Amino acid sequence: MLSRWLARRPPPAVLATLYLILIIIGAALMYLPFTTTRPITVMEALFTSTSAVTVTGLVVLDTQLELTFWGQLVVLILIQLGGLGLMTFAVLVFSALGMSFGIIHQTYLREDLNQTSYESLLALVRTILRVVVLAEVAGALLLSLTFVPRFGIVEGGWHAIFHSVSAFNNAGFSTFSSGLVDLATDPLINIVIPGLVILGGIGYVVISEVRMRKFWTGWSLHTRLMIVGTIFLIVAGMLLIALLEWNNPATLGRFDDPGSRFAAAWFQSVITRTAGFNTIDVGAVHDATALLIMALMIVGAGPTSTGGGLKVTTVAVLLLATLAFFRRRTHIWAFGRSIGLEEVLKVMALVAIAAMLIFTATFLMTATQDGHFLDISFEVTSAFGTVGLSRNFTFDLTGFGQGVIMVVMFLGRVGPLTLGFFLATRVPPRVRYPEGQVHLG
């Protein structure tokens, strides 16, 4: 019955349904008594599962103290499935079993990977598999050099594996109650974790092109925008965070030497985009820094990646369109390539929907939830960008507040798929109307 219902639904709706099913299964597993150290509510189980599947990282359960090894393992599996993408995972399983992958499944995969054609889909999936395995194994081995001497082979190895998978999938879950604050000056933490986050968030298409094509001249416009945009956001974010928090004794000011302060600013600049780890107390940053972090969270990572947000390319096209308008240009281009009107309209729709979603969720939260406006809006923005950073507010959420944040996390992860369906549904107009004048601005 379910398979026949899914067969009649458009691909984005099917994928959203599959993510919802995975969340329900994950919640059922989290509700089992051996996964937690105390009895939990259904809402706590649903929230944890939703946060893991959407690779967000907001928690209402202390991962270190309130989840057993089996609970942490369930979270890790949900992170891997949610970050990798259900259809990508299905292709890998089908390929391993020698099963065929039909045109319907390719349609779902095309939507899941945000691609516009069927060409090279399976090649892209194979690239994804290689990148995931190499990145997560290498990350775990490198992180074990920090964790094993501190906690021993078994416990330290588990911490290394968990953080490697969580970082590459831009999830932000940590097996430590305080996050990575106690390891803020560790060189490996400041190199490996951001490296995994960047690799997982830049997008598999970019990774494939950088690996296979000639430097710059062989790259597509998408890859060029992603590389330039990512570098700019990381550098600008690091410098601004350092400038704003340099003398804050609760954040960067607690470090004695400038090198450690810059390392913490670098770490938060990278992580803020979509991962959600922290080496400083995010709840103690200045209000201006909190607004900066919110802006970075909204931008997010890249398409066909493990990250969320509006995406770097979406914001880049929006800025290019705005620049073209003020320069009175009738078309948009970047790096010697033009950008079509359809892409600009899609960007406008994405930005409008994101703004309405964030505003509606923030309004509902402020109307029903006690708390400062900045803390609430920060929480909503973090949920939409599937980031996972919080100003120590998640544990104070009411049941209704948890429900709102879960919806925002879910839409932040699968919303573009559903939007793509509406954008792809074209109905030829039967009547053409004369143009009218609308005064704008």
Image (cartoon, rainbow, N blue to C red):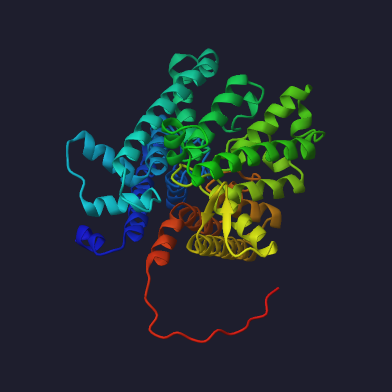
Residue at left offset 65%, top offset 40%: 232
231 with respect to 213 (left or right): right
- Which of the 4 quarters of the picture holds residue 208? top left
> What residue lies at 18% left-to-right and 35% top-to-bottom?
97
Query: Considering the image in quadrants, where does the C terminus appear?
Result: bottom right
Q: Is residue 27 above or below residue 234?
A: below
Q: Position of residue 42 (x, y in %)?
A: 42, 51
**In the image, is 275 to the left or to the right of 100?**
right
Q: Nearer the viewer, residue 321 or 63?
A: 321
The structure residue drawn at horizontal position 61% and vertical position 59%, both measured from the top left corner, is 321
Which is nearer the eye, 383 or 49? 383
* Whether residue 336 is visible: yes
Q: Is residue 289 left or right of residue 270?
A: right
Q: Between residues 353 and 40, which one lies in front from this camera angle?
A: 353
Q: Position of residue 128 (x, y in %)?
A: 37, 36
- Which x, y percent locates residue 382? 58, 49
Question: Eyeballing the image, is 417 above or below 124?
Answer: below
Quadrant showing the N terminus: bottom left
**Which residue lies at the image location 25% right of the left edge and 60% below the top edge?**
6
